[in-house]
Image: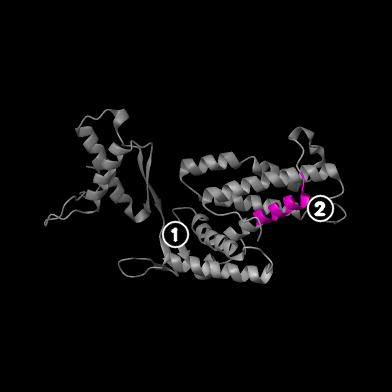
């Protein structure tokens, strides 16, 4: 009737199954913590299984004539994601094909530490920053693709610190923080800023993209899709770096901090806003935002 195989609750020997425990767990959680929403973040291969479990809950509530406002039906959702593979091999705990997260994070942190020692050997608190960068690289590897897309894990790609990566976003944040430290004073209030001093396509594109941040966050929540935020932050960082490196008509680099106080103030207001948005975005993704790198 429902175009699904039977939902098995007990084996012939009396042993329970996953469905038995998931249904019991759902009923317990609903009675104990009447939740607004319950999300099961499990691989897409389990889609039919969760359809079975949710249908059993729905049928139970119908059979008991549970009032609509007291039903959990519709409040429990399966947030599915693609396979996580290792060098084209599907990971499977039962077959012993696993990668231990501790090993991944340790290697990522070691690589970050090597990069720091090469590029910024005088950086304070290197171990803490290396950990933030290494962990961020691994998290971003998973959240920078759409959740339904398979992730083919490789050490080379996951631990890369070039291109569209978590460390690239963290470095942009650190650059923004450095500019604010160099500026070294309080920004004027918004009504005191001379916005006419902010010219050029790079600045305008950056402003327009910054204005989209609230809509992006709402879309992520509505679609359960962190990729949308990852892609947005990469776009924003790229636009800032274009703004940072823009040149005037004579080909000279336009300095963000210059002798022109009015232009400097309004550019730094844009820097502070960009830093705030990137910092908030990194936090939502679970990445730390180092002040220095």
> Measured from the top left, where is residue 25 in percent x and y?
27, 46
Q: Residues within 10 Å of mark 1 (few under 14, many from 20)?
A: some
Residue lying farthest front? 125
> Measured from the top left, where is residue 274 in percent x and y?
67, 46
User: Is 54 above or below relative to 165?
Assistant: above
Q: Quadrant of the N terminus?
A: top left
Q: Quadrant of residue 29?
A: top left
**In the depicted view, which residue is nearer to us: 146 or 22?**
22
Mark 1 residue element: loop
Q: Which residue lies at the image location 28% right of the left edge and 43% below the top edge?
A: 26
Mark 2 residue element: loop
Residue at which label 2 appears: 255
Residue at which label 1 appears: 150
From which residue to which does the magenta span run?
172-185
* Front of the two marks 2 and 1: 2
**In the depicted view, which residue is nearer to us: 156 or 173?**
173
Give the spatial CA distance, label 2 vs label 1. Answer: 43 Å
Q: Is residue 68 left or right of residue 286?
A: left
> Measured from the top left, where is residue 281 in percent x and y?
57, 48
Q: Determine if the magenta segment contains residue 182.
A: yes
**In the depicted view, which residue is nearer to us: 291 or 86?**
291
> Measured from the top left, where is residue 199 in percent x and y?
80, 43
Q: Quadrant of the C terminus?
A: bottom right
User: First in sequence: mark 2 or mark 1?
Assistant: 1
For residue 165, say whether it is visible: no
């Amino acid at each position: 009737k429902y175009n699904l195989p039977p939902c098995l609750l007990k084996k012939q020997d009396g042993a329970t199954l996953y469905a038995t425990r998931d249904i019991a767990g759902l009923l317990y959680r609903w009675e104990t913590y009447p939740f607004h929403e319950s999300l099961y973040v499990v691989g897409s291969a389990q889609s039919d299984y969760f359809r079975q479990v949710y249908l059993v809950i729905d049928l139970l509530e119908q059979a008991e004539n549970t009032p609509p406002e007291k039903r959990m039906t519709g409040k429990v959702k399966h947030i599915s994601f693609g396979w996580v593979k290792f060098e084209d091999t599907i990971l499977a705990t039962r077959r012993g094909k696993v990668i231990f997260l501790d090993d991944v994070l340790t290697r990522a942190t070691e690589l970050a530490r090597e990069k720091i020692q090469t590029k910024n050997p005088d950086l304070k608190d290197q171990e803490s920053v290396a950990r933030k960068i290494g962990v961020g690289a691994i998290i971003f590897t998973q959240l920078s693709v759409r959740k339904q897309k398979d992730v083919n894990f490789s050490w080379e790609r996951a631990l890369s610190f070039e291109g569209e990566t978590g460390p690239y976003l963290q470095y942009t944040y650190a650059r923004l923080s450095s500019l604010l430290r160099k500026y070294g004073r309080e920004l004027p209030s918004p009504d005191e800023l001379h916005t006419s001093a902010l010219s050029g396509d790079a600045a305008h594109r950056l402003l327009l993209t910054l204005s989209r941040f609230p809509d992006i966050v709402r879309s992520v929540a509505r679609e359960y899709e962190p990729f949308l935020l990852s892609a947005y932050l990469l776009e924003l960082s790229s636009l800032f770096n274009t703004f940072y490196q823009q040149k005037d008509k004579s080909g000279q680099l336009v300095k963000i901090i210059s002798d022109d106080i009015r232009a400097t103030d309004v550019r730094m207001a844009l820097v502070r806003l960009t830093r705030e948005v990137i910092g908030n975005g990194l936090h939502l993704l679970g990445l730390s935002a180092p002040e220095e790198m």
